[in-house]
Image (tube, rainbow, N blue to C red):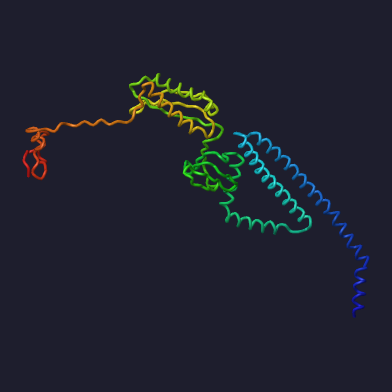
Amino acid sequence: MEETLDTNLAENVLDVPRMVAAWQEVLVWLKAHAANIIIILVVAWLLGVLSRILIGRIAKVLEKTHRGDEIAVLEQEKRVKTIWSLFAVTVRVVIYAIAVLMILAELGINITALLAGAGIVGIALGFGAQTVVKDLLAGLFILIEDQYRMGDVIEVNGGAFGGTVEKVSVRTTWLRAFNGNLHIIPNGSIEAVTNYTHNWTRVLLDFGISYGDDIDTAAQVIKDTALAMARESEWEHVFLSAPEVLGVEKLDDSAVVLRLIAQAVPGDQWKVARELRRRVKYALDEAGVTIPFPQISVSYLKEPKGEARQRMTDGSVYGYGKQDERGRLDAYGGGEGE
């Protein structure tokens, strides 16, 4: 029995005509499909190389559009490299995925079922994670457009949240408020951003003077004080332009309002404004210019005596009748109480 099996096995293994026929079938298949598969692989590889080169050049161009100090420049370079490396990987994954599908089709595998299954899975994931996808897309555009970066002071959605940016990721933005609270905001929920530290900022201050003071004198005092501060070594690097008094901004109820403006380094506008207010206050006081404040004048009548007091009590001085012991008035003006 065992000898019979060994004989059959040897005959099958050493069946040269069958082996030759099988090898011929392999050669025929290779002639029909191998060339296409090789072409697909070569084209996919070339597209991957070209995309990497192109994306690298775009990243280098964006790195040159930096702003801020040396630390900010290094941070922006790292951000650009991170973004475009992620983009390059995504492009290569798409290219190779398409190449794999084309090769499977060449191998005779029905990829329609695979695509249909992938579509169903994609739809399910899309419904389940559409918020996450929205956050990722919004974060990607925030990083690409450089709307804000770490260290910027911003407000989100019309002042709903505000503070210093501590971290920007593809999905969330971390804001540290002035009181120390940390706001973690999904990027997809950010509709509007106000950036207070982008490229340059403007110091805008209004000073009110009394209507009795000379406007030109007060304006000159404010301007001289601001220019003197801008020339000091401690502050000259903060001012990006010479301070300027625009003139009378408005005529308020109790003051003539003069407006001062100056461009400043981003992030320093608040300390510049505080110091300018302090110096201008002292300068106006020294020049004898009054900074008005709301006042209320109260007038009162002296207490009437004798007959005049009686007339006010019974109402005859006003012509509307007397008051009875309960304080009621004669509505008909007859002078008699009820």
Q: Residue at the bottom extreme?
A: 1
- Between residues 334 and 82, which one lies in front from this camera angle? 82
* Residue 82 location (% of width, % of height): 66, 44
Count all numbered tags in the image, as a single digit.
0
Task: Examine the rendered structure and indicate whether residue 115 appears above or below residue 311.
Answer: below
In the visual, does 232 lie left or right of 258? right
Which residue is found at the position 91% from the left and 64% from the top?
19
In the visual, does 278 lie left or right of 264? left
* Residue 108 location (% of width, % of height): 78, 58
* Residue 331 location (% of width, % of height): 11, 41
Q: Quadrant of the N terminus?
A: bottom right
Give the quadrant of residue 219: top left
Q: Quadrant of the C terminus?
A: top left
Which residue is found at the position 25% from the left and 30% from the top?
297
Which residue is found at the position 71% from the left and 40% from the top?
56
Which residue is found at the position 51% from the left and 24% from the top?
232
Task: Examine the rendered structure and indicate whether residue 277 appears above or below residue 188.
Answer: above
- Between residues 312 and 138, which one lies in front from this camera angle? 312
In the visual, does 261 lie left or right of 9? left
